Structures are given as C-alpha cells and as structure tokens.
Image (cartoon, helix red, strand yellow):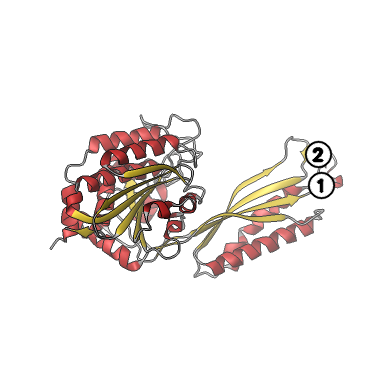
Amino acid sequence: MTSAAARTALDLTSDLPVTGLEDLYRDLHRHPELSLREHRTAGTLAERLRRAGYETAEGVGGTGVAGVLRNGDGPTVLLRADMDALPVAEETGLPYASETAGVMHACGHDMHVTWLAGAAAALAAGRETWRGTLLVVGQPAEETGRGASRMVADGLYERFGRPDVLLGQHAAPGPAGLYPHVPGLIMSAATDVDIVVHGLGGHGSRPETTVDPVVTAAYLVTRLQTVVSREIAAGESAVLTVGRIEAGTRHNIIPAEARISLNLRTQSEAVLGRMLAAIRRIARGECLAAGCPREPDVTVGSSFPVTVNDAGTDAAVAAAHREVFGAGTVFDPGPAMGSEDFADLALGSIPYAFWFVTSTPAEVWEQAPGDTVAEKFSAVPSNHSPLFAPDLSTVAPGVRTLVSGALALLSVA
C-alpha cells in the first residue's frame, strides 16, 4: 500500500511545468557564477520563491537565498541546493553551454537550483495537503567548503527558525533514474594542505650555488604518494592528491621557492591526523636532505566535514523514494570519497538525509566502454569534468525526490 506522503508527492508533481524548468536549467547553465559571485543565480531563485509565496531574503552569508513558508503546526524541514559553478572551461558542446569563459557548472549545481525551485513551487501550490514549515535555502560557495557555515553565521536560523531536519541531494554520474541512499556515512571529509619549499635561487648555469626547490618539490610529490599506500591501514579509506605545483618564472632561473597544494580525503579524524603528521615529517625530511636554508611551511587550509546521514531520517526518505520511483531504483552504494559542506548546516545535532540522483544520459551510458556497471561508471564524465552534463530527463524526477522527501517528514493531511 502506498503511503500518504508518496501519494501526495505523486499528485503534487503530476503536472510539473517541465518545459519551463528545463528552460530554467538551460539558462542557469549558460550563466555560471563562481563562489560568492552567484548574484544572478540567487536573484533568479529568489524571484521564483517570492512568486510561490515564500517570505524571501537575499544576501544571506554573502550571496545566499532563504525562503520560508509557514503552513500551520508541524515540523520545520529545510531543503537546500548549492548554487556556485567551477573555474572549468566547458567542453560539452551543448547548445546551452556556458557563455562565461573559463567558468562552468561542472558539478550540477545548476540542476540542483532547478530541482529546488520546482519543488518549492509544487509544495507551495499544494500546501493544503501538508502542515509544517518549509525553509528553502540556495547556498553559495559550496565548492570552497564555506558557504553553509557563512549562512549559519549570518543568522539564517535566528531569522527564519531552526529546522527540525535537513534534506539535500546531488547530481551524480550513473544511468539516469537511480537514487542512491546511505543510512550513515555517505561522503568523506576533505582537507586542503599547502607546502612551501624554501630554496636558494640563482642562475641556471650555476646550480652548485643554489638549493633547487623544484627538485625537492619533485621528490616530495613522489614521496607523498606513499602516505596512503604505506602509512594508512588497508581497511581505511583515504586519498591524497597533489592538485598543484608551482615554481619559477624563467627557463634559466632556479627559483627561491616552490609551492605544492594537496587535497586529502578521509573518513575519520584519526586517519586525517596520521596523514597530516606524515606530510609534515616527509616535507621536513626532504628539505633537510636537500640542504634547504629553512624548514618548509606546511599550512592546513579549508576543509569539508564528513557527511553522515541520520539513519532514521534517511530511511524515511528512502522509503518514500522507493514508493514513488520503484524499489529497484534505491540502493546503498556505500560511502563516497567526494565531499560536501551540507553537514555544516546541521550544527552537529540537526538530523539530515543527503542522497544522490544519477544523471548520465542514456546514450552516454550505453556507449561508455566496459561490460560492468563499475567499468562504465569509471568511463562516463564525472562531477568537475569539463564534459559533465546531467540529462534533462532528470529535471522532473529531481523535483519529485525533494517533494516526496519533504512530505515524508512534514505532517501530511
């Protein structure tokens, strides 16, 4: 028997303005904006929330949007979408490709905003079917890991009320039409680390008078790859990526310093601590071996928290999704190494559910090399790829996931 929440969700989304939502998505995709510059995107979302009847504010935490719809006694449910794009040059060739040079919605946040706008409108139009309060949030700067905390620090909950539960979702690679849920750890923590190697610069013709930081940095890059393979237990999950290495200005100048930027992915504080200790030790050791005039600078930068679903909340939302989309569409893929700042909205105590919506176009999935799902998954464009392009067929289902998730937690009439 279908639950009242599922039946109501199907009713409220049976006549979605799909063409209009697709147009919204194309417009957002054409006009991507980097973190804390999402002025146009925020304005577009805010206007749609106002038209739907939400009390709306802009500029929360910089460029964030918040809309509240109070609809009688019942729980307060927060629905969140992130809005920022990435410094990626688009290569999709789509007719609605980015018109901003070097900037692209390569992570699907344009689709997230579209889903949120559609769900907010559908729930407002059907407000006679439920009771409670909806807090709809367009969050800036997810890609920097700071947008959620900025909105909270700017008084999001003092102004609009503290929610009882949080809901969020993310476009992901995989054949369109699946809704992965994990009742616990679903996404990993991420930590940025910067290393500055101090050498002694000079002329390229006289290396014996210098201490070459480029050579030391090269050794460091190689040695750092042993941190995960030789210092982290096989049963633990961790990733260390050297995302950037910079040094020098001319062919014949040995520079005075080299800079290395790392990104760590971990699923426990203990593993993160071991990795940071190893990085500091290895950096000092390589610089000592090279005769650097001083120790390297090792700076821990921005970080993302782990995303750990509340099991009961996730079970309620997953059950609604199974009823709405079919039992075979919901499964547990285990935790991902990707990261999110969504958990910062929870303040360490508000329960939440976060899930994925697979979005690879059918023809792209079918043509991907490989005979297994895992092989195809590795071959299709992923988030942050210049080829990442969620299928338009996911517009309506992504609205429906948010609507059914919210109704599973609100008081349904």
Vertical comparison of 115 with 130: above or below: above
Q: Position of residue 333 (x, y in %)?
A: 36, 61
Which one is in front in this view, the residue at disc 2 or the one at disc 1? 1
Q: Position of residue 213 (x, y in %)?
A: 75, 48
| Residue at x 34% of width, y 61% of height | 164
Crowding at mark 2 (Cα within 10 Å: few <14, some 14-19, many 20+) = some
- Residue 32 makes an appearance in the image: no
Residue at the left extreme? 1
Quarter holding the N terminus is bottom left
> Gap in Å between the C-alphas at discs 2 and 1?
12 Å
Quarter holding the C terminus is bottom left
- Residue 341 makes an appearance in the image: yes
Q: Label 1 sits on what residue type?
A: Leu
Q: Position of residue 232 (x, y in %)?
A: 57, 68
Crowding at mark 1 (Cα within 10 Å: few <14, some 14-19, many 20+) = some
Residue contact at pointers 2 and 1, CB within 8 angstroms: no
* Residue 51 - label: none
Residue receiving disc 1: 200
| Residue at x 31% of width, y 64% of height | 313
- The residue lying toward the viewer, choosing from 178 and 58, is 58
Q: Label 2 sits on what residue type?
A: Gly
Q: Position of residue 39 (x, y in %)?
A: 44, 36
The number of numbered badges drawn on the structure is: 2
Q: Is residue 220 left or right of residue 34?
A: right
Secondary-structure class at tag 2: loop
Residue receiving disc 2: 204
Q: Quadrant of residue 29?
A: top left
| Residue at x 23% of width, y 56% of height | 72
Vertical comparison of 107 with 249: above or below: below
